Image: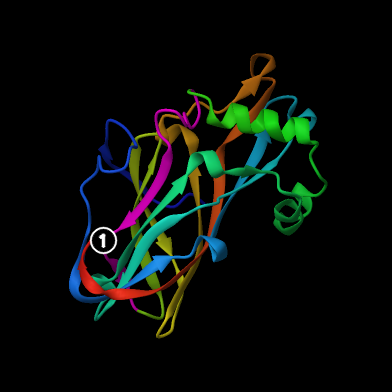
């Protein structure tokens, strides 16, 4: 089932600094995103009358940057994560193997490269104009045991609110968060790629999962 998505803003572009910066509440402890231990995984499905001749794809992130913070309670805790579009990896063999039977089997390098080009073209993610995917949450809902991130997800310059239950693990020096959600490309003004007059298409709906790890930095204050 699709999680609730509410349009909250449409910004002119996805360049760093175009959106209002979040303030970390005084007294909150800041954690820096660790890209070596963090990954966002996107499952891309085939569609159309001749879908059986197309491919499913697994897209994984790389080079994430950002900050998370922990306050006195979930409402004073949040995060900002930036994912460079150019660093997205298509159909890594290990990622496909981990994604399940529907994604079993390796995809030839030429097909992977072609999918990357199609994915980053202006009609889809438009890497030249919108180099980052940005996720922001100014405060968590729920409890520490069952937190929910009401996050602002910005893709291709369009921001949507997504409510994501999070599995959160906290220690003195480390935060880790896991969760999943489903989105529609068309909600972000993305035209799903198709060939043959729509005979083979990329499905509109994408399944996203994430595992984000952050390590402790200095205490509180603005970014």
Q: Which residues are magenta?
A: 123-143
Magenta-drawn stretch contains 8: no
Image quadrant where one finds the C terminus = bottom left
Name the image colouring.
Answer: rainbow
Q: Quadrant of residue 31?
A: bottom left
- Seen from this angle, which residue lies furthest top? 197
* Residue 102 screen position, x and y as percent: 76, 48
127 to the left or right of 59: left
96 to the left or right of 17: right
Which one is in front, 186 or 96? 96
Residue at screen point 28% across, 71% down? 77
Which one is in front, 200 or 38? 38
| Badge 1 element | loop
Q: Is residue 120 above or below residue 222?
A: above
Residue at screen point 45% across, 68% down? 166
* Residue 110 screen position, x and y as percent: 76, 30
Q: Quadrant of residue 171?
A: bottom left
Q: Pointer 1: what residue?
A: 138
Magenta-drawn stretch contains 125: yes
64 to the left or right of 24: right
Which one is in front, 219 or 161? 219
182 to the left or right of 57: left
* Residue 154 screen position, x and y as percent: 37, 43
- Seen from this angle, which residue lies furthest front? 218
């Amino acid at each position: 089932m699709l999680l609730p998505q509410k349009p909250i803003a449409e910004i002119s572009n996805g360049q760093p600094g175009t959106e209002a910066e979040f303030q970390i509440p005084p007294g909150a402890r800041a954690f820096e995103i660790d890209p070596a231990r963090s990954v966002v995984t996107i499952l891309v499905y085939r569609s159309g009358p001749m879908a059986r001749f197309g491919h499913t794809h697994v897209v994984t992130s790389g080079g994430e940057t950002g900050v998370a913070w922990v306050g006195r309670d979930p409402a004073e805790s949040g995060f900002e994560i930036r994912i460079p579009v150019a660093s997205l990896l298509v159909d890594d063999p290990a990622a496909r193997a981990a994604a399940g039977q529907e994604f079993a089997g390796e995809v030839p390098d030429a097909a992977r490269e072609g999918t990357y080009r199609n994915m980053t073209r202006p009609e889809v993610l438009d890497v030249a104009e919108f180099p980052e995917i940005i996720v922001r949450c100014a405060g968590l809902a729920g409890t520490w045991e069952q937190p929910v991130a009401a996050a602002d997800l910005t893709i291709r310059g369009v921001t949507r609110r997504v409510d994501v239950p999070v599995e959160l693990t906290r220690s003195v020096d480390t935060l880790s968060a896991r969760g999943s959600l489903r989105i529609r490309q068309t909600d972000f003004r993305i035209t799903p790629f198709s060939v043959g007059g729509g005979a083979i298409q990329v499905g509109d709906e994408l399944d996203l999962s994430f595992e984000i790890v952050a390590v402790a930095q200095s205490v509180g204050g603005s970014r």
